[in-house]
Image: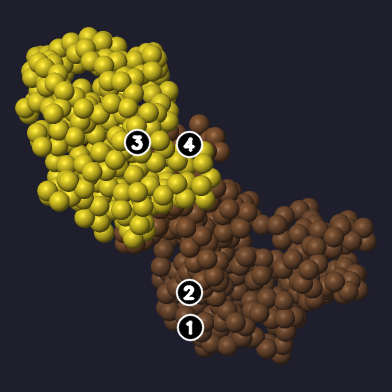
Chain colours: A yellow, B brown
Amino acid sequence: MIEVKNLKKSFKDGEREIEVLKGIDFTAKNGEFVAIMGRSGAGKSTLLYQMSLLDEPTSGEIFIDEKNMMSLSVDEKTYFRLSKLGYVFQDYALLPELTALENVALPLLMQGASEKKAYEKATEHLILVGLENRLNNLSSQLSGGEQQRVSIARAIAHEPKILFADEPTANLDNESSRAIMDIFKKLHAEGQTIIMVTHELEYSKFAERIVHLDDGKIVSIEKSK
Amino acid sequence: MFSTLNIRIGFFLAKRQIKRTSIWTTTLIIFVMFFTFINLVVISGILVGLIQGAVDAVHVKYTGDVFISNLSNEKYIENSSQVIDIVKSLPEVDSYSARYVEPGVLEANYKTRTNDKEKRNTAATSIMGIDPIAENNLTNFSKYVIEGQYLSPGDYDQILIGAFLDKKYMDVDYPGFTPLENVQPGTKVRISVGGSTREVTIKGIIKAKVDQLDMGAFMVDTQLRSMIGRNDNNVDEIAIKLKPGTNPTLIRDILKQNGVGDVAKVQTFDEAMPKMIKDMIKTFGLLGNILSSIGLVVASITVFIVIFINAITRRKFIGILKGIGINQYAIEISYIFQSSFYAFCGSAIGLVFLYGFLQPFVTAHPINFVFADGILVAPLGETLFRVSLLVITTIIAGFIPARLVVRKNTLDSILGRN
């Protein structure tokens, strides 16, 4: 379970302080699929960065499985991300010098898995996202949709507690977007907790709940139809 | 920081980054490291080699391996014949040359000078009496004749002069030393030594890049002996060449034990080396070290810039690595591996180039400096020490920029924010 309490985030713009998140309170249960929606600049991605421990909030608290994340050091947060969180970036964020297989295996290796085990597990997850024929391709040799699928495989290979996705279909055509959402749907059906930022209503419907943000505040939370 | 896991991941990342980066980028960086290595080793090696060339020249062309000379309070080596007998009896001796040395004056224009006011064309020098065959066996003396011919044992009124005694080879002013003008092989000169004067012909001019030889004049030993009236056959110096592998110190000690030390100064070539050259070796060594240190600083700045640019351009990916949970130390170690790789490759190519080509080439074709034939001095031990310095400096220079970039906020790195 992830719980966010009175989360605020501000940025300095010269002398001016811009408050992007203005006290967010939010909870997602284990196994839940939540979509965060809002217009551009509403603070969706900023909220996701704070919850996924990629950024430091200005104030407020984040609990994951009742553990206060604010008390963790930088190194502890890195380790927590490695072991408990998965992240799907909007622009895929694959490492260009690694093959699809190596990109997926890297977090597993960092967890201490042997090369053989890491590659086995990475292969298994790449097959899961339909890339069994692209294992040894560099990211530059993959299409956008394929790169995003590698990114998903990398995010789930170490079986994270929560999978964060930041507009995972934003750069993809309809067909690829649909394929990505099908993977998410399947993962959710298997019990994966997913928190996804999207601005596309069509894909937000895959979630159980939709959180609407505007001007740094939650304006509504609705159950998906 | 240096846990097995971090090292393993660092190696994993570095290996793939090097393997899949542009071959031209890798080649360029290794090329820079190669030249840095050359700068570190060769510049100082040539500087030291310049002096070493002079040292070797004195050793090979003048003193031999062991040098016997008169005691400071004696005019010559007493009982020279007995000393020579002892030298000849040693099986380790390959060859030797006994020399007479007397100060003298050469005069070139004594025939053409029309009045006493006209400047005399003279040169004060050391006249050396040598056995032409023994000397040639010891020092290959005939090889240094650049004009005319070498002496023959029967030459009565023939001399060789060092190139610096001929003005056309002495193009700089040497305080207290005046060369002869308009002389060449065949020119008659008047030689005054030990109170005798004789008209002789210049048979040849020698240039050995050893001051004692290039500023001296040479005639057959029997002729000089007769001019200075040295009827007891006592010589002024004996140069000894030993068979290969013989320790000169051992022979010096044997000679001393046999009483030679009582009548003469017995020195190895190292000991006989003029103090000025010993001081120059130290000075040039120091200069070489200073230049190497500058080279090392340049190398570290180069690597710093290369790795910094690499890390800055890869900042987003460093952010992603941290974002997916890769330990920052593992990322830093990957840059250490990369900079080590460049340093090792550059140094390895440098070592092969140095010992496989450059040093043998310079040894075979010494650099023609005015006062010495410059060689390249690069002892393996010292070179490896410099390689270690280069590698350590490179690792530090690679680690610092990597750390600077890795320590930035993860999200700022991913999003490219400052």
Q: Which residue is depicted at the point 92% across and 58% down? A: B257
Q: Are the residues flagged by discs 2 and 1 in contact, CB closer than 8 Å?
A: yes
Tag 4's secondary structure? loop
Q: Amino acid at mark 3?
A: Glu
Please report whichever mark, 3 or 4, sits nearer to the chain's N-terminal start.
4
> Does residue B351 sit above or below B311 in this rendering?
below
Q: Residue furthest front?
A: A225
Q: Amino acid at mark 2?
A: Asp
Distance between the Cα atoms at labels 3 and 1?
105 Å
Distance between the Cα atoms at labels 2 and 1?
8 Å
Q: Amino acid at mark 1?
A: Gln
The location of residue A125, given as percent across then percent down, is: 38, 47
Tag 2's secondary structure? loop
Q: Nearer the viewer, mark 1 or mark 4?
A: 4
Establish whether labels 4 and 2 are both on one chain: no
Relative to the observer, which residue lies in front, A76 or A63? A63
Distance between the Cα atoms at labels 4 and 2?
82 Å
Tag 3's secondary structure? loop
Please tell me the numbered disc located at residue A111: 4
Q: Which residue is mark 3?
A: A190
Distance between the Cα atoms at labels 1 and 4?
86 Å
Q: Which residue is depicted at the point 56% across and 60% down? A: B377
Relative to the observer, which residue lies in front, B366 or B292? B292
How crowded pointer 1 is (Cα within 10 Å; few <14, some 14-19, many 20+) is rated as some
Q: Is residue B70 left or right of residue A180?
A: right
Establish whether labels 2 and 3 are both on one chain: no
